[in-house]
Image (tube, rainbow, N blue to C red):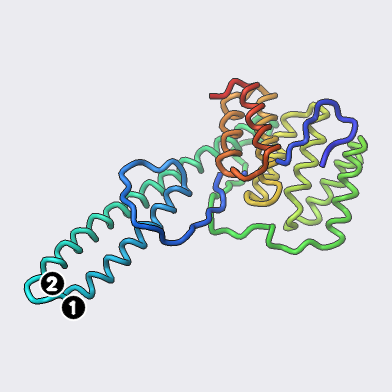
């Protein structure tokens, strides 16, 4: 996808809690470090839960199958191991809650800043709650009329008919608020705002697109463009944090996005 005749507008195949795939029980591991993200915490919790289940199964059979005089010793050792692992699980769960709270605070701060840049009242912004269990709009089927309306609006933007295209995109978002394509609609609306130099409005639009479906197909694109736009607005700290979130949340987003993030971070002087 690209914008026709828009000089220097790079088209990157462009979102705080990402979907995490747990790979099941693996070999038991002992962990004494600190997890860096929710995915790592959940993965380690999964390992410890599997190890606990195995030990409890062994503990249950120790008293009945062990020879007289040895069962109590084995059971004591297993109980001690269960206590140790249970303590680790509780610590990981505590750190997981802390990490989610930290990510929530960062997202709230970002929404506040963008709303302020746009000239709105940050106190009236609807909260976005990070919840890895929530369903996404990508699960909803796409109706033919939705795709047709969006394609028509995108073509207007691509061919430079910005007023007409923006009007169609706003109508699309209003007509199909639950569509799985709404994140894409926000992206193209943001692109139009961006190339017209309306950076506060563009930032607000990209953020709205990310908020509409944090795990949808256009979530990384909206988040990336939000970081780029914040950089244009001189919000360097927020821009760098947002760009870091792109690679953290969407490590498989594709070479174009990841290269775009690296390039933009270098340009902004991000750590």
Whole-percent x, y for residue 108 in the image:
55, 40
Whole-percent x, y for residue 223 in the image:
65, 39
Give SS at disc 2.
helix
* Residue 115 left/right relative to 40: right
Q: Which residue appears at 78% of the width and 47% of the height?
A: 185
Give SS at disc 1.
helix
**Residues under labels 2 and 1: Cα distance?**
8 Å
Q: Are marks 2 and 1 in contact (CB under 8 Å)?
A: yes
Image quadrant holding the N terminus, namely top right
Q: Earlier in the sequence, mark 2 or mark 1?
A: 1
The 10 Å Cα crowd at callout 1, few under 14, some 14 to 19, many 20 or more, is few
Q: Which residue appears at 39% of the width and 52% of the height?
A: 44
Q: Which residue in the structure is indicated by mark 2? A: 71
> With respect to residue 66, does 229 lie above or below?
above
The 10 Å Cα crowd at callout 2, few under 14, some 14 to 19, many 20 or more, is some
* Residue 70 left/right relative to 181: left
Q: Nearer the viewer, residue 76 or 87?
A: 76
Q: Which residue in the structure is indicated by mark 1? A: 65
* Residue 78 left/right relative to 156: left
Whole-percent x, y for residue 101 in the image:
45, 44
Q: Quadrant of residue 210?
A: top right
Q: Which residue appears at 55% of the width and 40% of the height?
A: 248
Q: Which residue appears at 68% of the width and 32% of the height?
A: 260
Q: Nearer the viewer, residue 3 or 62?
A: 62
> With respect to residue 115, does 250 lie above or below?
below
* Residue 109 left/right relative to 155: left
Hey, which residue is sitting farthest left in the picture?
69
Whole-percent x, y for residue 15 in the image:
62, 44
Q: Quadrant of residue 120?
A: top right
């Amino acid at each position: 996808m690209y914008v026709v005749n828009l000089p220097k507008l790079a088209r990157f195949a462009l979102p705080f809690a990402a979907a995490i795939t747990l790979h099941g029980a693996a070999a038991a591991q002992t962990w004494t470090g600190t997890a860096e993200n929710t995915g790592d915490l959940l993965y380690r919790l999964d390992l410890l839960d599997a190890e606990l289940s195995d030990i409890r199964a062994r503990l249950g059979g120790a008293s009945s199958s062990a020879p007289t005089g040895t069962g109590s010793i084995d059971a004591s050792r297993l109980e001690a191991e269960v206590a140790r692992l249970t303590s680790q699980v509780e610590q990981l769960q505590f750190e997981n809650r802390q990490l989610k709270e930290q990510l929530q605070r960062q997202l709230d701060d970002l929404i506040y800043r963008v709303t302020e840049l746009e000239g709105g009242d940050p106190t009236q912004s609807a909260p976005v709650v990070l919840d890895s269990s929530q369903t996404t709009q990508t699960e909803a089927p796409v109706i033919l009329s939705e795709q047709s309306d969006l394609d028509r609006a995108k073509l207007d933007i691509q061919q430079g008919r910005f007023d007409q295209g923006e009007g169609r995109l706003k109508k699309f978002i209003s007509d199909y608020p639950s569509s799985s394509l709404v994140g894409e609609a926000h992206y193209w609306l943001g692109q139009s705002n961006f190339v017209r130099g309306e950076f506060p409005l563009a930032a607000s639009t990209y953020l709205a697109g990310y908020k509409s479906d944090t795990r949808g197909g256009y979530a990384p694109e909206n988040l990336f463009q939000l970081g780029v736009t914040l950089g244009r607005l001189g919000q360097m700290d927020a821009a760098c944090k947002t760009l870091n979130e792109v690679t953290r949340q969407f490590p498989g987003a594709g070479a174009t996005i990841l290269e775009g993030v690296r390039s933009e971070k270098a340009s902004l002087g991000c750590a």
